Every structure is written in structure tokens, then in C-alpha cells.
Image (spheres, helix red, strand yellow):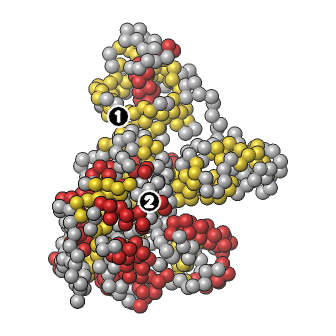
Amino acid sequence: MAASPQRFTSVLIANRGEIACRIIDTARRQGYRCIAVHSEADAGARHVGMADAAVCIGPPAPAESYLSIDRILEAAARSGAEAVHPGYGFLSENPDFAQACLDAGLVFIGPPPEAIAAMANKAEAKRIAQRAQVPCIPGYEGEGQDDAGLIRAAESIGYPLMIKAAAGGGGRGMRLVRSGENLAEELERARSEALGAFASDELILERALLRPRHIEIQILADAHGNCIHLGERDCSVQRRHQKVVEESPSPVVDEALRQAIGASAVAAAQAIDYVGAGTVEYLLDADGSFYFLEMNTRLQVEHPVTELVTDTDLVAWQLAIAQGERIPRQEDIRRQGAAVEVRLYAEDPVRGFLPQTGRVLHWDPSPDVRVDHGLLEGGEVSSWYDPMLAKLIAQGGTREEACRRLAAALRSSVVLGVQTNQSFLIRLLEHPAFIAGTDVTTAFIEEHFADAAARGAPAGSAEAALAALLLYRSDAESTAPEWRAWRSTARTDTPIRLRRRRQSWDWIVRHLGGERYRISAADDGSGDEPESLELTHTHTDALGFSHLHSGEGAVHRALLVRRGDALWVNLDGDAHHFEDCTFAAPAAAVEGSDGVLRAPMNGRIMAVNARTGDAIAAGAVLAVVEAMKMEHAVVCPAAGTVEEVAVQPGDQVANRQVLMRVRIGSGSDPG
């Protein structure tokens, strides 16, 4: 018999960013008092402003704030909270946190601690699934964790195989190994990432399915023994085992397969007496076989697509279940249409999806689709937390309509000030193979976007010309240097040099009177017609313009933002970042080719692999920087000798901070 529920009217959200905002949105509409927690870095964050009250829980480092059980419980006591919602990530799947909340007299809006513990470790989760007759991928989840034992197990399983962190997911500690040659090295790297992300270096091994689909089932269970599923989500489009696009329903799952996987997910949940919202994840092979992957004992990032196709508010159901209410019957669940979600990340797809930091200078999401986000203009995207900025979710009567609406919404959304994957997402949604839908596997990005040029929009002359025009107008409206003084009557030529990555443009800007400008390439000898622009309207930094020389008659809309020497241009969903380098010294042709190795982003030094005087081979990993939950290698571009090491493990570094200096070409190449 289920225990009588403890009623509550106030909820502390033990999380940040878009999920904290999402929970507050539903909880406040249902009349609950919402308490936010925040680190010192998040004092001005959107979720803090949305809440009825907020409590600072410590410094920016997650271990001292969002991962501190004691500080969150102190915040609950200080604010008078009666319940705690963990969101996802951070402490959401920590059984000790769930138990600590209960011990403090708080309602934990999630499953019982015992259920979380049962699925928290991938090895134990597979054993439970096997006992419940849920199909599992062959592998090794034994207690022997030394290299020799794991290598023997790998040889028994066969290659290719996956190394996974037993204590967590999200791609941390996960490695694909195609042969035994580099297994020991990958085991070491997987342990390091797993230990840093989950405070446990336990690993499991699984036979690798190279081109599966990633299917997950949303389940709901109440305290009265009832458990149902809400159908599947297809999360096959991934990068480094991190989901990028999610959709419901899956284009390859028919009703019979849906019911079979759904029944399997319910069996897995009932095997641990689950209560609340959760997700059981599977790999679906080409022959229709499906295998248990893991169970997430929390809300998922991609839950909105299920909400849209089932007309359900999963956060509302979490609150209701925590209050002791019964869930609907399986036959009461109705599905209609299709929904697709993309994750907008602060990352640079062209540079290997490297996480980015910076200040959000402009944020204007599309009003035509659902947007879950925690962004505020002027807010800082830091290296302390996950690089996901927002989620855009579109619904349609069909998958084709939902994808079309989502691509259009991405084109009309504007985020400037930090590099994002927006342009890449548009290209992905409009790729013919994705539109077809039937051959989309976890290898999709690797197969179709291996070339950097395919992942990002190259800046053309139109974008560079607009950036030059922004710079010209910006200086004209301020106290400009004499060399760039602006006169409304004289038609003077103004030189401007812009750079984006390794490409540069030299422009001559001439004001033709009114809102007409001619922007010409400076002495390039190409004979190309100059970019001649006429502004049709201006509103703050938004410029409507037409090309005078093209004769097309179309008016384009661009949004431009300047901050110091940095210029941002958004044109049809493609954001381009330029640097005003008119008076800058020439840069090295290749990053690091001057021998100065810099941090690729704000982060923490995890490893330093060289000392002063060491001879270094080209391609050697000299340092490892951890940022936004990932480790990033700093590689020497050419052979040389280390002249200076400026950092040590544990140091916090800023973007572009000097890490090492190498005398390129000196000494012998040790490789």
C-alpha cells in the first residue's frame, strides 16, 4: 500500500538554465511558489528572475554550488521550500541527494532513491534489465577493472566495441574502439573523463553497433503501482554521443515495434519499483532488433517532443505524481502528428564543434515554434556549464511539415555575440538524407558532415560587406578617429580590413548619399563588380538592404552588432563573426605556427604533457583543457622545442591565454 503523500505548495529547483526556466514555467502556472538557486556566476540569469525567490549557493564551480548537496539543502531550509525538483544533469540522478532531501523532510520530485541507485550504475542496470528479460547488448560489466582484465574481456567481446563510464552518460567517458592497438590508451582517457564527470572511474564494455538508431521510450509511473509508456523518441542524430536532433515518432518504428519496445521499457521500470517520469533508452539495429542501453531516472532534455505529440505536460505530471495522484491508463494516451527538436549549442561546427564562450549581445528567438531557453541579452556564456543554450521544437501534422517549420524558425532566430551551431542545424534539417528519414543513424553526422565546410556557412562578400558597413556607420555615429571621419556631403573613401578565421577582406567604403553605399574590394584586380548596397530601413542594429548592382529587386534583412573590434552579422539564419583588423599586425597563417599555444576557450588545465627543453613532434598533445564537461587537446602544429610552460594542472585559464611557447623547427623531430 502506497504511503500517504506529503502535500506541498513550494518547490525549489536544484538546477539552472533552460530546464530551471522550463520547470518554473509549469510550476508557477499551477500555483506553486518557485525558489531558484544560483551560483555567483548565475546571479543575473533568466531562471533567477523568473522565480519567486532565489538563493545563492556558492562559487561558479559546480562542485561548490550546483553539485553541493549541503548547500542546496541549506537553501531549501532558508527559503522555506517544501519540495525539490532536480531537473536534469547535476544531482538529478544522485541517490544520495534524493535520500538527503527525504531525510530533511522535503518531497523529492523524482523516483525513490533506491530506483535511482539501481539504474545509476550501467553495469548494475544491465544486470537488472537482463533479469527482467529486457534484451541487452553483449558486453562486460564485471568488477575487475584493471587494464589486463578489461583487455581480456575486450578480446572475448570482439571489435569494434564501446567503452562506457558505468556511473553516468551524456558521452563522458565513452570511446569507440575499432581494434586492440589503442585500447589501453582509450581506457585511460575514458577513466579520466569518467572520474572527472561522475567521481567514479568504473567502466563497462559493449559490442559496438556501428549504424544503429537511438530510440528511447518515455514512461510514467505512480506510487500506486501503475506504469505506462508515451511512445518513442528517435534521437539518432548525435555528435560525440551527445544528441543534436530528437523527434517523435520515429520514422522507422511501426505500431507493432512501438508496443514491443514500450512493453520492454515498462518491464524495466517495474523491475525497480519506479515512480515518476523516466526514459528507457535502446539501440535499434537495422534488422529490427532492439537492445537496452540505459535508463535515465529523470526528465530528459528532449521531453518536449513527447509533450507536443501527446498533448501532455510532463513536468505537471511529475508534480502530480509527487502529490500522490494516479497517472492515466495506457489506452488513454493519444498521439497526433510529429514533433522535432534541435539543440542550439555555443560551439563552432567548423572548428570541430569546439565549445565557445562569450556575451550574448542579441537574442531574438522565433515566435513560431516552442523555444525552451535560459538566455538573456547581456548574459555571459561561461566555460563552467554545459554549452547548450536553447532548444527549438516544432510540431506539424507530418514529419516533413515539422522539419520545414523548424528550419524556417532557425532562419528567423537571431543569436549574436557567441558562436553557435545554428547554421549547421539548418543544413542538417534540410539535408536530403535527413528529410528522407529512413537511413538516419547514430553515424549520420560523421557520414554526411565530415567536411568542415559542410558544417558551417562560409562568409561571402555580402556578409563581409555588411560587416564593413556596420563598422563604417558605427564610427560615423561616434567620435571617430580622423582617418575615418564621416561627412554626409563629401564622398570620401574609407579603407576597412576585416578578418574571419584565416580569411580576410580589404574594403573601400564610399558613402553615395542618403542610405546608399558602395563597398569595393581594394585593389584585388579581379574585375568583379563592387558590392553596392542601399539600405531600405534601419532599426537599431537591424538593416534592410538590397544589392544595387544585382538588379534582383529583393530586399534582404540582416542584423548587425558591434562590440569593440568584434562585429557580428546574421543573414538568413547564418551568423558570422568578423574582427576589425585594419590596424592590426598580420596574424600567423596557422594557429600556433608562431610557436605560441593558447587556450582554445575558458577552462581548467587537466594535463600538461611537456616540460621546458623537451623536443616535441608535430601533432603532439601538449596540454588538455576541460571546459563545458568535455576535454580538449592542445596540439603542437609543428616539431620544435618547448621554451616556456606557463600553466600547470588545476589552473583556470581564459580563452586565448598563453599555455606554452615552442621554438618551431629547432632540434630534431622525435617522431
For the residue pair 168 and 218, the one nearer the viewer reads as 168
Q: Residue 91 lies in what quarter of the image? A: bottom left
Query: What secondary structure is marked by label 2?
Result: loop
For badge 1, the amino acid type reads: Ala
Q: Name the residue under label 2.
A: 65
Q: Is residue 125 left or right of residue 112?
A: right
Relative horizontal placement of residue 331, taking residue 133 as reference (left or right): left
Q: Is mark 1 on a helix, strand or loop?
A: strand
| Foreground label between 2 and 1 | 2
Disc 2 residue type (three-letter): Ser
Q: Residue at x 32, y 24 (%)?
A: 535
Point out the image quarter for the N terminus: bottom left
Q: Viewer-proximal residue, 278 or 215?
A: 278
Q: How many labels does the image show?
A: 2
Q: In which quarter of the image is residue 226?
A: bottom left
* Mark nearer the N terminus (2 vs 1): 2
* Residue 643 percent coordinates (x, y): 76, 45
Is 2 above or below relative to 301?
Answer: below
Give coordinates of residue 311: x percent, y percent. 19, 66
Give the residue displayed 32% in from the left and 54% down from the top. Answer: 54
Per the model, the C-alpha gap separating discs 2 and 1 is 40 Å
Question: For mark 1, what is the residue?
Answer: 558
Q: Where is residue 126 in the image (x, y as percent from the top left)?
A: 45, 83
Task: Return the residue nearer the eye: 113 or 424.
Answer: 113
Vertical relation: 143 (above or below) 671:
below
Q: Residue at x 80, y 55 (%)?
A: 670
Quadrant assignment, res 87: bottom left
Q: Is residue 23 above or below residue 253?
A: above
Q: Which residue lies furthest to the front in this view?
A: 78
Question: 150 or 408, which is in the foreground?
Answer: 150
Check the image and report above or below for 414 versus 281. Answer: above
